[in-house]
Amino acid sequence: MKVVLRHNGQMAFLAKADSNHWLPLDAGPVSGGTNGANSPVELLVLAAGGCVSMDIVFILGKGHHEFTKFDMELEATRAETHPRRLTSLHFHAQIEGPNLPEEAVIKALTLSLTKYCSVSLSLDRSIMFYASCTVNGVPHEEWIIERNTATYE
């Protein structure tokens, strides 16, 4: 993969990867930007959420589990001092569908975070992952995702 970042004034950039889509980036005023676009850390969290969401849709589809609505919410916690790295991510899937078993959603979310999501599995293993889901309006208790400390090839 090749990425190009083009400076666009102050802390603003335009970025493009192999897919050839331009994406704006910026920082907040405290960091010298204008808050005109997502920050790099926000994009990292968005990427993790997108990757996990796509995995869940794929896994549920392979299991012939239909759904009518799917939302993913992520809550990221960062360290208070520099480098203000991510310390935890909480993934919360909200999904609805007739005859959709809660166990299938839990399994799909767990499989994504432990085996399939290339973005989340590329993040430092010291970042704590938490997961939860609400299936057809019924919340399921949060669980910790055990992260394998082995590296992947």
Image (spheres, rainbow, N blue to C red):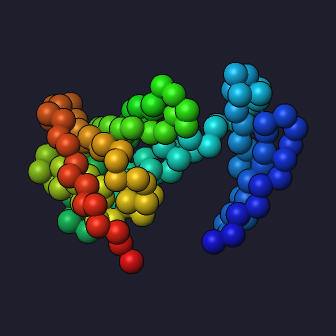
Asked if residue 99 shows in the view, the reply is no
Q: As displayed, is residue 130 above or below residue 100?
A: above
Location of residue 121 in the rendering, given as x and y in whole percent from the top left corner:
38, 60
Q: Which quadrant of the figure contains the N terminus?
A: bottom right
| Residue drawn 77% across the image and 55% down it | 5
Location of residue 9 in the rendering, given as x and y in whole percent from the top left corner:
88, 38
Q: In this view, does 81 lie to the left or right of 117?
A: right
Location of residue 61 in the rendering, given as x and y in whole percent from the top left corner:
28, 63
Q: Choose between 23 and 56: the one closer to the eye.
A: 23
In the figure, residue 127 lies in which quadrant? top left
| Residue drawn 84% across the image and 34% down it | 10
In the figure, residue 137 lies in which quadrant? top left
Location of residue 56 in the rendering, given as x and y in whole percent from the top left corner:
31, 56
Q: As displayed, is residue 140 above or below residue 64?
A: above
Q: Choose between 20 and 35: the one closer to the eye.
A: 35
- Number of residue marks: 0
Q: In this view, does 102 lie to the left or right of 127?
A: left
Asked if residue 43 shows in the view, the reply is yes
In the figure, residue 62 lies in which quadrant? bottom left
Q: Which quadrant of the figure contains the C terminus?
A: bottom left
| Residue drawn 83% across the image and 52% down it | 6
Q: Choose between 31 and 115: the one closer to the eye.
A: 31
Residue sitting farthest toward the top: 30
| Residue drawn 51% across the image and 28% down it | 81
Residue sitting farthest toward the front: 82
